Amino acid sequence: MIDSSPSRGAWVFAAAFVGLQLGWGPRYPVFRDELYYLACADHLAWGYVDHPPLSIFVLAIWRALFGDSLLALRILPSLAGAGAVLLTSGLAGMLGGRQLSRTLAAAGVLAAPTFFGITGFYSMNAFDFVFWLLAAQVLLRLSQAEAKARARLWILLGAVLGLGLLNKLSVGTLGVGIAAAVVATPLRSDLRTRGPWLGVAIVVALVAPHVIWQVQNGWPTVEFIRNATRFKNVNLGPVGFFMAQIRDFGPVNTLLWVPGLVWLFLGNDGRFRALAIVFVVSYLVFMSGKAYYLATALLLPLAAGSVLVERLLAQPRSLVLRPAVLAVWLLAAMLPLPIVVPLLSPERLVGYMNTLGIVPENAERSELGALPQHFADRFGWEELTSIVAEAWHSLTPDERSRAIIVTSNYGEAGALRYYGRALGLPVATSQHNNFYLWGPGNPDATIVIAVGMSPDDLREDFGDVRPTSKITNPFAMPFQRDNPVTICRQLRVPLLEAWASGKQFI
């Protein structure tokens, strides 16, 4: 009988994870993407330029109940992360693991620095772990269940994949991997039954509203992905992508997931080969994207590797090594912890990274400063809001009636919406991603307070361009400090024409 219950140690690790994320995570300010998602929650729809709607619907409900304080924003991703720890432990159990492997699998999740980083702020990525692990568990049950039970499991798998796609489109890769696994394993016999097709029908029904939104808006996500691939994301190449997995998912975890992948393919008479096929498909698809895209799929061979380690230590003379193995993984989890959880002040973190010889790596083409991007993108927003407020209140009442605030990216616009309420600022706009679809606000505006834009570029559309102050926070992303807040008058072209020409889906 399949046992998917986590070990007692996994429950301890899950609780420790939540304690770390909620106890220390709010020490640093709100992250750029969180500010954007809060703005999206003010405009509920069946889709957005750069993500599906599920996480935004959840955020809107959560905010209505508990507000949008920093602590409130971090509760759900922390719980999702804890759920991923428990589900990975349970997956090891489904692969035949006992207490050691289930506990080691949970420790392996904590030893993956990228896991802490991804679940350290509100985004669809935190929930993505849960959908992948749930789908993997259902797929394992399908591989071992009797025919009558499989029909219900196909329906459950369809619901998991459909909701997962509404959370993040990369779950489509998971679906392709599962399809490949079905064709390449004895599960293909089910294709002659209605079970798999009912699952597909559920996926289509759940995702249809989002597809309709894409059609109505001219497939903006397709344009976003194309632009991000060409102009934004760093192409690591095959070797660089593999090395990034070793670095970001933890060097010690390589000792689990690489042998675990081989074991999934070759061990147990191929009973678990479906998971290996899912991983290989995911690896090949995500290899041209950011390194962290693979983090969800890596949990599958990670769980398998923990079972393999347990079996290697099954001999009585090896029992003494078991606590030492767990200690190694816990130490591996602790060493990079300050780099992914705000345990230290920014100044002390820089010193800690210098001591370890760690240089911040960037998955995008923008320049990095002293801090990694997942921390740097939390600094400078309150200072920026104060600068914009000073510029806004320098206008006369008549000018303010004809003015709007336009930013160069969604982080700035989200920050001004979040922090600007207390300073009397109007709702900021942007031509970046979904802000573009929401429009400029006042279509008759002739004065623009531009944020994060080059004064030289602004002079092409305005006759009077007056830069004010720049962000000085040393821990903010460098590109956020490059361009000042600028007051622009004497608009030379109609506002809506200028708005349309500045669309940025990237």
Image: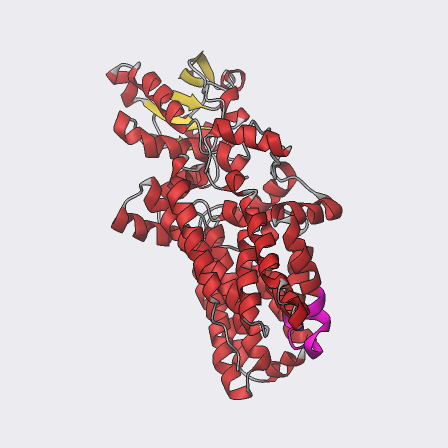
- Please say whether residue 273 is one of the residues in the magenta stretch: yes
Quadrant placement of the C terminus: top right
- Tell me if residue 295 can be seen: no
Magenta segment: does it hold 118? Answer: no
Coloration mode: secondary structure
Q: Up-down: is 125 above or below 433?
A: below
Is residue 255 something one can see in this rendering? yes
Quick check: 449 above or below 201? above
Q: Is residue 266 left or right of residue 127?
A: right
Residue placed most toward the observer, 331 or 299: 331
List x then y, in percent, for residue 115. 53, 50
Which residue shows up at 31% across the image and 29% down it?
Answer: 420
**Left or right of residue 365: residue 50:** left
| Image coordinates for residue 253, horizontal then vertical, percent | 63, 54
- The span shown in magenta is 262-274
Residue 463 location in percent, x, y? Answer: 45, 12
* Camera-side residue of 472 and 231: 472
Left or right of 62 on screen, residue 431: right
* Residue at 58 percent of width and 60 percent of height: 323
Q: Quadrant of residue 371?
A: top right
Q: Main secondary structure of the magenta part?
A: helix
Q: What is the x, y in percent for residue 386?
A: 35, 22
Seen in the picture, residue 126 relative to 374 is either above or below; the reply is: below
Q: Residue furthest right?
A: 239
